[in-house]
Amino acid sequence: MAEQMTGAEMVVQALIDQGVEHIFGYPGGAVLPIYDAIFQQDKLEHILVRHEQGATHMAEGYARSTGKCGVVLVTSGPGATNAVTGLTDALLDSIPLVCITGQVPTPLIGSDAFQECDTVGITRNCTKHNYLVKSIEDLPRILHEAFHIATSGRPGPVVIDIPKDVQFAMGRYFKPQAQMSHPTYKPQREGDIEAIRLAVELMLKAERPVFYTGGGIVNSGPEASRNLRELAELTGFPVTSTLMGLGAYPASGNQWLGMLGMHGTYEANMAMHDCDLMICLGARFDDRITGRIDAFSPGSRKIHVDIDPSSINKNILVDVPIVGDVNLVMEEMIRIWRAKTNQPRIEAIAPWWKQIEKWRSVNSLGFTNSDTIIKPQHAIQRLYEATRGRDVYITTEVGQHQMWAAQHFHFDQPNRWMTSGGLGTMGYGLPAAIGVQVAHRDALVIDIAGEASVQMTMQEMSTALQYNLPIKVFILNNEYMGMVRQWQELLHGGRYSHSYSDALPDFVKLAEAYGGHGIRCSDPSELDNAIDEMINVNKPVIFDCLVSKEENCLPMIPSGKPHNEMILPDTADIGSIIDEKGKVLV
Amino acid sequence: MNANLLPTGSAYFLTQQTQTPERHTLTVLVDNEPGVLARVVGLFSARGFNIDSLTVSETEHDKHRSRITVVTVATPKILEQIKLQLERLVPVHKVHDLTAEGNAIERELALVKVAGVGENRVEALRLADAFRAQVIDASTESFVFEVTGKSSKVEQFIALMAPIGLVEVVRTGLAAITRGAEGM
Ligand SMILES: Cc1cc2nc3c(=O)[nH]c(=O)nc-3n(C[C@H](O)[C@H](O)[C@H](O)COP(=O)(O)OP(=O)(O)OC[C@H]3O[C@@H](n4cnc5c(N)ncnc54)[C@H](O)[C@@H]3O)c2cc1C
Ligand SMILES: Cc1ncc(C[n+]2csc(CCOP(=O)(O)OP(=O)(O)O)c2C)c(N)n1
Ligand SMILES: [Mg+2]
């Protein structure tokens, strides 16, 4: 099946053969041949962005909401360096991306040529793998291999750097093989059956169990979410999730404890602290979860299922490590559990549930509402109520609004929640929303934003307009980099050094300047109508929601504290809680 | 209870060392593709691991396989992370911790330049003989010795040459292989 074509044509053909329908990119001298090949076909739709960082976040949103690989195309030099933030973001959040970068012609590499940069050197540590294609003979293999590596095992970003002369060269193209195999890269998918048996045995004996689930369930695909639900039902155990795993288990489920971690619920964190068996499924014991490691869940046995062996025993030592795809492992767990009993452990864990109910009654997500000023938590709750039952996708920027969204917007399905968790990249949400909308044209896609974050990639509004992508940017405008302000209140005596959002643009006029629709709301009694207006306008919308300025995002486990020392809502003086040791932590 | 009832380390209180660092020799079998050494070395620097010695060469030309021998000093827990992180790199076939597996032979080669006249020359030759070092260059006032052996032997030889008139040393870094019939 070998066909003669140019390198540029191979790129386009390989993308089509890999099932790619949309790519996000920005042209420049070193990718002109590829742009020319794109021009001459109509199977691939190219979305022209306004900044290469935007392209990477769009591809991330696209990938996370579809389960497919996101694809980015950028030019050499500044095109590649502008993509670095999004690549790093995708690496930390395990998002499958293939990013094609143009490079100066091979004879010029290393000569400080115009728009040359060492792309493979710069991106080596922020990609799962990267390639510099030195010869046209290698190109088809590398293109297909890149998709295989990006999407299998622990997903991640892969860069293919293609010099311009290779794009012009003629060579033989071949199609991807049905079964990709690689001489050295062989992720392990099946879990060790003995370890799984031991895990189920511990589960059958547990009295205070908890499922601690994460982004790995979403990575593993929709089947994994179904199996998680089945496993939860079968066992009767409570379920909590990290920020990255929200929606894998339904927030409306009876066994749902809410998110855990630094801004998680009291019941989720107390259950983690006091459990006797922790079953970690596709989560990585991040420091936002563990808090103080030597006080982390001191009395529990721990089972950890992860496809990446290096995630296991990295931060927390576990008793039963299981390397494998979490979906396959859960399937085995269900089968083995069923073979032993058909009963959930209702009676045995009844006292545990009773305890959990006590923690729940603390109502750790509570807040004092107001009828004169919009509370940010209230705004999210109204947004959630107004959009219930619709086909909704939520993206966020980074900060307090992100945490409030995680706490007060509820997800019953996976792939509906796109947020930058690992890198915490302000400016992620707006382009991510565009990427989601490209994949789901008729859905309601909302970026829950902060007024500071959203200005980092605001120019992508122009992309949204160009392609008629009616994204909704819902800004919780507190006129502060609220998360920074909160930490300054906690740790630095309330000295708000450079965290005030001064000289803000008029977001309504800004929306209109882009050709979109602007809404402003500051009165709680008008909020519902304003939200309805936002939903019903079939255009990109910027909603400037003016909220209380100095609200703190609670509950919170302060740095350096164990899980059972959370700051609960309505704590008056948060400035005196963290000691000197805690202050050096992030 | 945490695994194996070991006390856990803490990212928040890193000074609280519960394990003592050990010196280990790792063999990393890789595809000799461009950038592979940078990937391996970059991983050490990016994650704050140490490299004490590094030896690299293509060892199976037909398969483009290289062996990278790395000597590192780390706690057992960090060593495990190093190994798993290395194995995660796409062009890496296998990583062996020769120290943990035990029973490996380790050799190093050094070229040692010594300058001196009279009694010092005689003494230098006498010591070289005792260490089975070869003279590979000589002038009226200098020698270059080639010495091979365990790192400790090489160290000792260099230390003895210091008072005699040591000028400079170059070392290859460690090469290591397992004993017996089995390959990696
Ligand atoms: C301001 C801010 C505050 C935050 N506060 C919180 C907080 O309060 N609570 C919180 O939870 N997070 C919080 N985060 C996010 C946090 O930083 C981490 O990103 C997040 O906790 C990591 O989620 P995870 O453990 O699910 O891992 P992910 O980053 O989603 O990693 C997935 C894990 O699953 C594994 N995996 C992937 N695919 C598979 C598969 N098929 N099978 C098995 N395993 C697989 C991977 O190897 C990896 O170990 C916050 C972030 C920000 C920016
Ligand atoms: C690119 C980038 N720079 C800096 C930070 C540090 N940071 C985290 S949250 C935050 C403030 C965000 O402010 P805003 O978008 O208004 O959200 P709020 O917390 O007010 O809801 C900053 C500066 C970051 N996460 N990303
Ligand atoms: Mg703000």
Image (tube, rainbow, N blue to C red):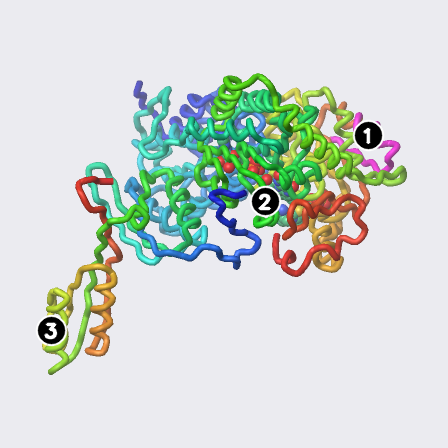
Q: Mark 2, mark 3: which one is toward the viewer?
A: 2
Decide if residue A567 is on the left or right side of residue A325: right
The residue labelled by disc 2 is A298
Residue B88 percent across, percent down from the top left: 40, 39
Q: Report if residue A529 lies within the magenta region.
A: yes
- Mark 2 or mark 1: name the one nearer the start of the chain: 2
Residue range highlighted in magenta: A517-532
The label shown at residue B126 is: 3
Q: Amino acid at mark 2?
A: Pro
Residue A464 percent across, percent down from the top left: 64, 30
Quarter occupied by the N terminus of chain B = top right
Residue that appears at 28% across and 48% down? B102
The reply to whether residue A180 is in sight is yes
Residue A320 percent across, percent down from the top left: 48, 35
The residue labelled by disc 1 is A530
Residue that appears at 23% across and 54% down? B106
Q: Report if residue A376 lies within the magenta region.
A: no
SS of the residue under disc 3: helix
Q: Amino acid at mark 3?
A: Arg
The reply to whether residue A452 is in sight is no
SS of the residue under disc 2: loop
